[in-house]
Amino acid sequence: MTTIEGLSSDNSHPVQKAWIEADVPQCGYCQSGQIMQAASLLQSKPHPSDSEIDSAMASNLCRCGTYPRIRTAIRLVASGRKAAPANAAKQDRS
């Protein structure tokens, strides 16, 4: 079993990088579950369609309604495009 900490300790996992680049987090309540579900989806289906993304992510509720950004982050990883380094994205927002 992999936990959120098991993906990477420094936000270097592609899903974590994409999450930061797409500015997905708001309150943080659902982030661990959303990230783990997205990582699982992409491991089993590296290039999911929008309907496959929606179906896979449907059981994870986001109280802030960041579903469009979640889909954007998943598409970013699926496209193979390199996300900006996690710490660079943080610096840009400072």
Image: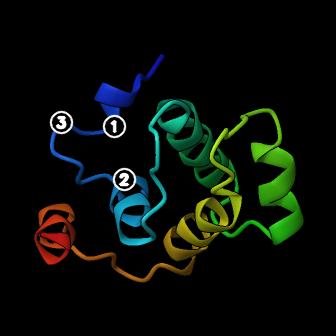
Would you place residue 47 above or below residue 17 in this image? below
Q: Nearer the viewer, mark 1 or mark 2?
A: 2
**Which residue shows up at 50% across the image and 69% down it?**
77
Closer to the chain start, of discs 1 and 2, is 1
Describe the element under mark 2 as helix, strand or loop. helix
Instruction: Compute the Cα span from label 3 to label 2.
Output: 10 Å
Q: Nearer the viewer, residue 57 or 42?
A: 57
Q: Verify CB contact (< 8 Å) between mark 1 and mark 2.
A: yes
**Which residue shows up at 44% across the image and 37% down it?**
28
Residue assigned mark 3 = 9
Q: Which amino acid type corresponds to the residue marked 2 in the rendered image?
A: Gln
Q: Residues within 10 Å of mark 3 (few under 14, many from 20)?
A: few
Q: Which amino acid type corresponds to the residue marked 1 in the rendered image?
A: Leu
- Give percent across and percent down for residue 61: 73, 35
In screen coordinates, is 89 left or right of 21?
left
In screen coordinates, is 13 left or right of 43?
left
In screen coordinates, is 33 left or right of 54?
left
**Which residue shows up at 13% across the image and 72% down it?**
88
Residue assigned mark 2 = 16
- Give percent across and percent down for residue 64: 62, 47
- Give percent across and percent down for residue 10: 15, 44
In screen coordinates, is 32 left or right of 92?
right
Q: How many marks?
A: 3
- Give percent across and percent down for residue 32: 47, 32
**Which residue shows up at 17% across the image and 64% down it?**
90
Q: Which amino acid type corresponds to the residue marked 3 in the rendered image?
A: Ser
Residue assigned mark 1 = 7
Q: Split into 4 quadrants, where in the image is the C terminus?
A: bottom left
